[in-house]
Amino acid sequence: MSLALHINIMENNKEPSLVDKAKSLTTAAVNWATQDGFSKVSDEVFQTRKNICLACPNWDAAAFNNTGRCKLCGCSIMKLYMPSSRCPDNPPRWDIVKT
């Protein structure tokens, strides 16, 4: 997510639009394919990321049939598996994992 989009969301207290969510998902998927070769983070990294998200005020636990969704980027828990993904908060609560 771009810094401008993040600032706009934080200033207006609005979640990203459907278009912004689609862009975020597309970027994450392309990076996962091209940078990570569809590899996943370790179970330990996944669990750490998950615990951080579950405790975050930007996490909507009821979304996606109670599997959760980030209010900043609109992504689900699947993004936590991707080494090239980072938390969209500023500063990020968790970061990219080099594989």
Image: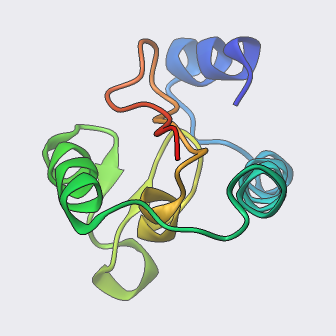
Tell me: residue 39, above or below residue 25: below
Residue in the foreground of this view, choosing between 57 and 12: 57
x%, y% of residue 36? 68, 56
Instruction: Tell me what residue is drawn at x 57 percent, y 34 percent.
Output: 14
Tell me: residue 97, above or below residue 24: above
Number of numbered labels in the structure image = 0
Residue in the foreground of this view, choosing between 16 and 36: 36
- Residue furthest front in the image: 99
Quadrant holding the N terminus: top right
Tell me: residue 64, above or below residue 59: below
Viewed as shown, does residue 76 lie left or right of 32?
left
Viewed as shown, does residue 60 lie left or right of 9?
left
x%, y% of residue 76? 48, 66
Tell me: residue 82, above or below residue 13: below
Instruction: Tell me what residue is drawn at x 67 percent, y 42 percent.
Output: 16
Instruction: Tell me what residue is drawn at x 32 percent, y 27 percent.
Output: 93
